[in-house]
Amino acid sequence: MAEGVALILASGSSARRNLLRSAGLAFDVIPAVIDEAARLDAWRRQSPGAKLSEAALMLASAKAEDVSTVKPDAIVIGGDQILALEDITLHKAKNRDDARRTLLSLRGRTHELHASVAVATGGKTVWTHVETAGMTVRDFSDAWLESYLDAAGEALTACVGAYEFEGQGVQLFERVEGSYFTVLGLPLLPLLAELRRRGAINS
């Protein structure tokens, strides 16, 4: 890590945190406090017909800026992920039954994951990036689904789509088109390149 540069992750996501730590970054975690649902609803009203990837960018920027206003001298990283099944946006499951409904709606179909990342300093977004992964869920059996729900535990409510791709949730899929990091919710390689460009990590 470059000396004298404070990095902050404005997210409580364990997947994003683990990705950055595995990459050797030293950083603090200060989760942003924003009403994502309200911001997404307002965005839909103001931007009819816009792509959901743009909504993911908006939310990532909002998170980064929320923390950056409190820590203006730091480089703050915000991230977001939106799951789109045709014209339907799916959110994190609230409980096991909600997770079951989500996974049944995805069974045998292809959906998109839009993963975004934003960097903010001084309360303003200075860089953003978004990537999309195509996710094809296999036609799993009802019995397998129940066994997965038993095994997944808290992971069911920890990630959008009710699957933990880095764990047993990978068994849900028949095909994935896109970056592994995008699936986990953080376009890591473009972010690392931007941090090197800014001198936040050694090049």
Image: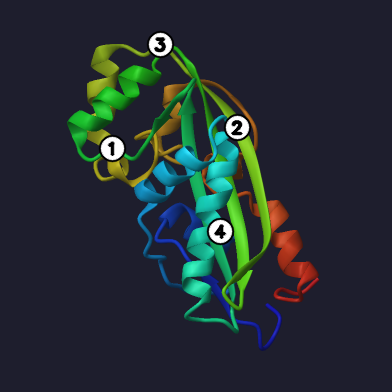
Q: Amino acid at mark 3?
A: Asp
List the residue tagged with mark 4. Answer: 61
Residue 48 spot, x, y in % from top left: 53, 33
Q: Identify whether 77 is placed above or below 161.
A: below
Tell me the kind of residue under disc 1. Answer: Ala
Which one is nearer the viewer's eye here, 12 or 22?
12
- Which mark sits nearer the N-terminus, 2 or 1? 1
Mark pair 4, 2: CA separation:
20 Å
For mark 3, what is the residue? 139
| Whether residue 24 is visible | no
Of pointers 3 and 1, the one earlier in the residue sequence: 1
User: Between tags 3 and 1, which lies in front?
Assistant: 1
Q: Give how far apart the Cα atoms at labels 2 and 1 are.
A: 20 Å
In the picture as drawn, the residue positioned furthest to the bottom comes out as 4
Q: Earlier in the sequence, mark 3 or mark 4?
A: 4
Q: In the rendered image of this protein, does residue 196 appear above or below residue 160?
A: below
In the visual, does 173 lie left or right of 127?
left
**Which residue bears the numbered disc 1?**
93
User: Where does the image place residue 115, in percent across and percent down from the top left?
Assistant: 56, 43
The residue where tag 2 is placed is 133
Residue at left offset 61%, top offset 70%: 124
